[in-house]
Image (cartoon, coloured by chain):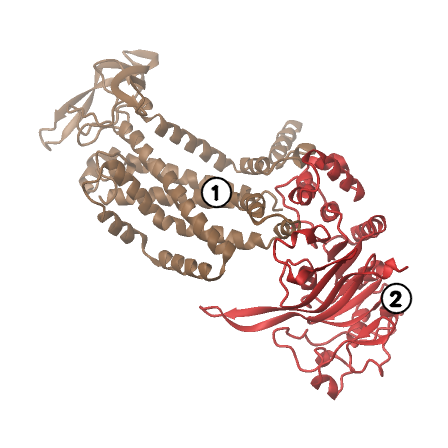
Chain colours: A red, B brown
Amino acid sequence: MSADNQILLSVRRLKKYFPIKKGLLRREKGQVRAVDDVSFDIRRGETLGLVGESGCGKSTVGKLILRALKPTAGEIIFTLDDRQMRINELSDTELRPLRRHAQLIFQDPYASLNPRMTVREIIGEPILVNRETQIADLDARVVELMDLVGLDSRYLRRYPHAFSGGQRQRIGVARALALNPDLIIADEPVSALDVSIQAQILNLLSDIQQELELTYLLISHDLSVVEYVSNRVAVMYVGKLVELADTEEIFRHPRHPYTEALLMAVPRISERDRPETYTLSGNVADPANPPSGCYFHHRCRYATDICSTKPVVMKQVANGHQVACHRSRDLSLKGL
Amino acid sequence: MSRRLGISLRFRREKSDLPEGESYYVATPRQLMWWKFRKHKLAVVALYVLGVMYLLALFAEFVSPYNPNVRHIRHLYAPSQKIHLYYEGRWHVQPAVYGLKFEIDPVTLREKYYEEKDKTYRLRLFCRGDQYRMWGLFESDIHLLGVEPGGTLFLLGTDRMGRDMLSRIIAGSRISLSIGFIGIILSFIIGLILGGISGYFGGTADLLIQRLIEVMRAFPAIPLWMGLSAALPMTWSPLKVYFAITVILSLLGWVGVARAIRGKFLALREEDFAVAAYLAGASRWRIIYKHLLPSFMSHIIVVLTLRIPHMIMGETALSYLGLGLRPPITSWGVLLKECQNVQDMAHHPWLLLPVLFIILVILSFNFVGDGLRDAADPYAA
């Protein structure tokens, strides 16, 4: 099992601040702390779920790892065999090798496929621009990928407008797989799809994970999706991680009040399954002007004086369970 | 009853927009656009109208009955001649015109023209007439339409110097229609460069270009054109003046184009499919020409099409005011300069006919632009 515990990606104190520019001269008037001091590891072969509300910075984390954005500070270390790539330091040209190892699956299967390209061109583009295969073999490789994701290879010359949302997402998955990556970042891969299609795509993702020994970072706001496919779950709130644990552990025994509130909000079919309802009040803290102490204190029903004054850091509370809460030891929170 | 139903069903079927099945699934963007454009009936008609107008302009010397600069001194201010199929007491297949007789009205002292019913001249296709040099390549004297020797064929009348209006309008279309195109191409080049820099690189360059555009937009167009064209040396050759006027028109025309291009660049740069290409390792150049340009070209064509009328109007206005093109160059604006007073309009209304052509062309461009706008994004629901 040693191979399973090998760390593929290591994120250390990652920060991304977006400047707020105002006025005719566009002077910098402040910063949005989209990602603020985030650290976690992803082990080879696992699926790490990253959950949080809209705007909490979870997609930004994904983009930083792929260097679609340049981090303000922090380290992103990618471990391949014995080689380590410090992604945060690489220049644009040095990033090219990274593209073969980490790819992204997009949220919106409509916006992410160029409507003016055929399926063959879309799936083949990564192969073509990285000169992975001879042009003559391109078709064969694309057909192979289409088979892998369950698309009829007769559709090779069709344009995206011929496909449904679920099929389009399969095309997106095939494109992400084209370079045989180690890590796939799936940014809300099913949230734009019908519920009936969501399961199909999630099953597809699990199947190809087994087959190709992939590692996933699954970004989602939907806890049921995360529960279904993740080995471990990280919860984000206003640019910071607040809790990180095994899926089973975090769903049964959450240690952070925010995680508890998220779990309460998961829709259940029967009211009997939900002993107590509790909805968060107030708004998400403004990442441009975060509150003092714990960012969550003004919405937290367990908050005490210390929560509004003293900043909080991630601490190990049990084996593999990290949480950022002053009261994590004396609260007993409800899971599912 | 069933007949009626059948008709209505067929009508429905025609209106249903797209072909079914595989041909739709593998349809290229251009095909999709054409299918969508085709639904816009008015735009299709307008496209044909423009096609005919540009063909006329292209073959101006051949299709016009006379040399536009030849003066028929016996027929000054002649009204338009009617074409008859009934003459010499019976119906004919070959149309003909009557001779024109000129008289001075003894009371008003105005010139008057009468049809001489006893003199008929038949029309002929591919008839020999005035000499011309086609595109500067070869000499010819064959005209599409002419009349038997001795007769005259002034379908739209003649002007102050007895020049055939129809021939002059066709000759003028060559300048008026091409100035729109050349002007828009110049605007496009300036707009693409400045708008592209502005949208793709952003930052200070964007800031400066945007402020420049705002100043340009706030500038009243006609006074600026007037000032610039008044500054052109009188000694310049007509060809030089023509190009100078085109440049002047596009100096203001690029503004809207640059804005459109910048907006598209900004929007598309952040599109998921452009990000996907970047993450796949595609070079910046490949992203621009393979992903961004094809996506916004159709929109830019719409913007350009809708701006051509402004160019044509600009040229017409300048020439009408005597600041643009000057004789011997013939453009629609130059022709309209002939009727700047009420007397001309009252006594020789046919001198205003170029206006009809201007309206026709500008409406057509607008209809085509509308149709293209609907078709520009064939992927919208």
* Same subunit, tags 2 and 1: no
Q: Residue at x 34, y 12 (%)?
A: B92
Horizontal side of A275 relative to B184 (left or right) equals right
Q: The residue marked by circle 2 belongs to what chain? A: A
Q: Residue at x 40, y 41 (%)?
A: B185
Of the 4 image quadrants, the one containing the C terminus of chain A is bottom right
Q: Amino acid at mark 1?
A: Ile
Q: Which residue is mark 2?
A: A248
Q: Given contact means CB atoms under 8 Å apart, are the residues at marks 2 and 1 in contact?
A: no
Residue B215 visible from this viewpoint: yes
Choose between A260 and B78: the one closer to the eye: A260
Choose between A36 and A203: the one closer to the eye: A36
Q: Residues within 10 Å of mark 2 (few under 14, many from 20)?
A: some
In the image, residue B31 lies at what x, y percent? 58, 35
Q: Secondary structure at mark 1?
A: helix
Spatial separation of the CA atoms under disc 2 and disc 1: 56 Å
Q: Which residue is mark 1?
A: B301
Horizontal side of B314 relative to B238 (left or right) equals right
Choose between B368 and A22: the one closer to the eye: A22
Q: The residue marked by circle 1 belongs to what chain? A: B
In the image, residue B120 lies at what x, y percent? 25, 14
Among all residues in the image, which is located at the extreme front?
Answer: A82
Q: Residues within 10 Å of mark 1 (few under 14, many from 20)?
A: some
Residue B316 visible from this viewpoint: no
In the image, residue A20 lies at what x, y percent? 55, 70
Horizontal side of A72 relative to A206 (left or right) equals left
Of the 4 image quadrants, the one containing the N terminus of chain A is bottom right
Labels 2, 1: front one: 2
- Rendered position, A193 above or below A219: above
